[in-house]
Image (cartoon, rainbow, N blue to C red):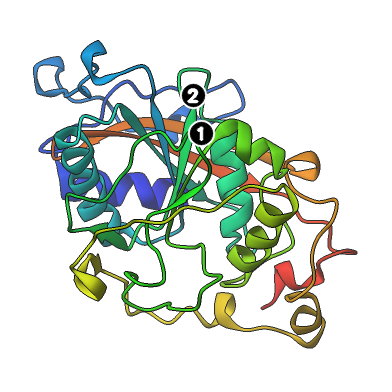
Amino acid sequence: MVLVLISLLWLQLSCSGDMSSVTHQDRRDPQLLPPPCPTERQASAADDPSWGPHKLALVVPFRERFEELLVFVPFMHKFLNKKKIRHKILIINQVDHYRFNRASLINVGYMESGNDTDYLAMHDVDLLPLNEALDYGFPKEGPFHVASPELHPLYHYKTYVGGILLLTKRHYYMCNGMSNRFWGWGREDDEFYRRLRKAELQLFRPSGITTGYKTFLHIHDPAWRKRDQKRVAAQKQEQFKVDPDGGLTNLQYLVDSRQELTISGAPCTIINTKLECDQSQTPWCLLS
């Protein structure tokens, strides 16, 4: 999977979105890593101290949605730079054989976000903000749901907190992150809403935005991944329960490799991640 991702990006970018500063640990296979582009073609993110003290970790749970990624990274880098938001974009790419686990990947993003960031954006790769009035600044008062039900093109129920959610790393820690039990698409955001309530965190949403459901561009890949959409009987029973203990405290994963890339001049970090699954607790992680 790592080779497929890197090969596809290499073919499509061909140094117009330069691949640079590729690093790997001893466990990782250097044969899977591409050569860097020439130094003069490499790009770096703006890091102007006048932009303020805070830095955003834009965490993107990801698997196989390459065309969306090629649009997302340069779009978001330009959008955030225009708003003078110091940031780094972390693509948490699931490369194991289990079903997609968005919540666990966001937990990994928190763990791998580094000491240079102090707040997170839990950000879907298929959702692009079109209104520059949307606030991506430091959410000091409490979690800020950018893709609110009044603005999201698809999801409109009042307890929805998915799509794009900003919160400080301290607030994310107070929630113990997200539950790791949600293998496949859906319901992890609803469980996280309950965690926000339990932590007594007030949820904030945009105000004064007049663009309605045209506030975002949804670029979802139409490919139907039946393996990740399907829910078995046991999973159906579990999906509406609160996970009282799971989250950051029982997250198990391995960073298989890490690549520093630029896509059309926009830098990002690909963190190829292998999650672990306790099949006695969540056997649906291996649904065939």
Q: Quadrant of residue 210?
A: bottom left
SS of the residue under disc 1 = strand
SS of the residue under disc 2 = loop
Query: Tag 1: residue type?
Result: Ser
Residue found 41% across the figure and 71% down from its top: 149
Please tell me which residue lies in front, 274 or 176.
176
Residue at which label 2 appears? 24
- Residue 223, x across and y down, in percent: 37, 79
Residue at which label 1 appears? 257
Using the image, determine if residue 114 lies above or below residue 8. Answer: above
Residue found 74% across the figure and 62% down from its top: 181
- Residue 248, x across and y down, in percent: 73, 41
Crowd band around label 1 with a 10 angstrom C-alpha radius: few (<14), some (14–19), many (20+) = many
Q: Quadrant of residue 139?
A: top left
- Residue 197, x across and y down, in percent: 69, 56
Quick one: which residue is furthest to the bottom in this view? 233
Using the image, determine if residue 101 lies above or below residue 109. Answer: below
Horizontal placement of 252 versus 76: left or right?
A: right
Q: CA distance from mark 1 to mark 2?
A: 6 Å
Horizontal placement of 19 versus 246: left or right?
A: left
Query: Tag 2: residue type?
Result: His
Any part of residue 111 in sight:
no
Q: Are marks 1 and 2 in contact (CB under 8 Å)?
A: yes
- Residue 232, x across and y down, in percent: 74, 85
Horizontal placement of 130 versus 100: left or right?
A: left
